[in-house]
Image (tube, rainbow, N blue to C red):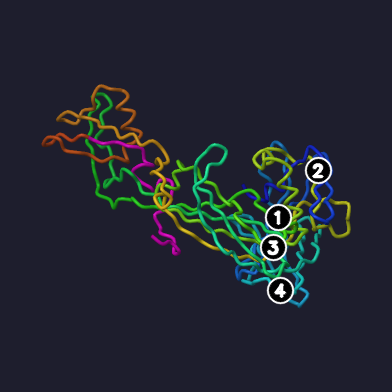
Amino acid sequence: MKKTQILQVILSFFLLLQIGCTEPFEIETIDFENVLVVEATITNESRHQQVKVSRTSTLENPGGQVENNAEVWIEANNGDMYQFSQDPETGDYISNTVFAVEANVEYTLKINSSDGLNYTSEAVILPETVAIENVYPEVITKDGVEGVQVFVDAFDATGNAKYFRYEYIETYKIVAPNPTSFIAEIINYNSQSETFDVQLTPREPEIVCYSTEFSTGIRQTATNELDENRVERFPVRFLDKNNAVLRERYSILVKQFVQSVEAYTFYKIINELGNVESLLSQGQPGYVSGNITSVGNPNEKVLGFFEAASVSMQRIYFNHEDLGLPVPPYFIDCNVIEIDYNDNTTLDNDPNEREILKTHIQYFDYQVIFAFHPNYLIVQPECSLCTYFSSNVRPDFWED
């Protein structure tokens, strides 16, 4: 689930969090209010930066509401200004130009809502950049479940970067276990006699696909209380050994964000409010103070945080056999069913076979047992066409 949604929570209790010598954020319990929600992390990556702007939602509409037609821009104290435009598909605001956050420059987010209200953030600066030293998988047992834990190591010799947040993007290869070489259609179907003809059109088998998924939730760690400014064996992603994403080749891109203490504290509070899944099922009964305020109305509540974060990343690949693990099961149980027909292609008098054929007719192969007497092999579409739930476009970065 996305951090934007996490910020749209209602808190049913008070929580004060002390991190080192930092001051805690205040949390208030409130009735539902139509509150602006902002999620914006700009980085030292040269790209189109992104700002998410929405409104809190009621229990009846837990998904939140995109704030449409707002004016969004970022001002830098070196004189630069970056305008943002709303993406018509996602509703997010994307910078009109590609830019990267620079060191020792202050950035301020500005938002004018469509109803004429103005908002501004505190000025933020880019923290120290710290490279990821290593990303690596190990087979462990976690909570009684054997699987693969992906760890990350990092070290900052300067001692200036102490607060870290992690995200990942995982991509995995899918191979259809029962690929079909035909597009199959029933033609000349007679509902009275249950007779028909089967027309098979050759097709290029869709065997190999790739799926990409993004991390959800908040993963953070801090080194401010350690003797050495080192992140060691921080767990980023755990995969049950029976997870189908490990069946073929698996890749994970780990992204490390160095945060300011203020940004770290804000997301730490959000994360410690409870299970993220349960938070998203609630409405908006509480408020976590961030660094964005309403211009001219300091009492108006605004949820969210604007941060500048330095990013480093590292990608790894591995197969289950590299770790000595058995082949995991496929995503679903593939039940290959053989259906016999008599010489004039009349369906057997079996209602189950008729339903199976009607459900899977686009996704079967066949074997000719005797001349002019085919036996049709039927399987779920997910097992014969990997494109049923994924893409057969090989990612540019992929390595076999």
Q: Is residue 6 visible?
A: yes
Tell me which amino acid carries mark 3.
Answer: Asn
Marks 4 and 2, the one that precedes in the sequence: 2
Q: Secondary structure at mark 3?
A: loop
Q: What residue is rendered at 60% in x and 57% in y?
A: 88
Distance of mark 2 from mark 3, alpha carbons? 28 Å
Q: What residue is rendered at 40% in x and 40% in y?
A: 329
Marks 2 and 3, the one that precedes in the sequence: 2
Query: Which residue is denoted by mark 3 in the rendering?
Result: 229
- x then y, percent, for residue 253: 53, 59
Q: Is residue 210 visible?
A: no
- x then y, percent, for residue 53: 70, 55
Tell which tag, 2 or 3, sits nearer the viewer. Answer: 3
Distance of mark 4 from mark 3, alpha carbons? 21 Å
Asked if disc 3 and disc 1 are in contact, CB closer than 8 Å, the reply is no
User: Which of the 4 quarters of the picture holds residue 124?
Assistant: bottom right
Distance of mark 1 from mark 4, alpha carbons? 26 Å
Query: Which residue is denoted by mark 4 in the rendering?
Result: 103
Marks 4 and 3, the one that precedes in the sequence: 4
Neighbour tally class for label 3: few under 14, some 14-19, many 20 plus, Cα within 10 Å? many
Tell me which amino acid carries mark 1.
Answer: Val
Query: Which residue is denoted by mark 1 in the rendering?
Result: 53
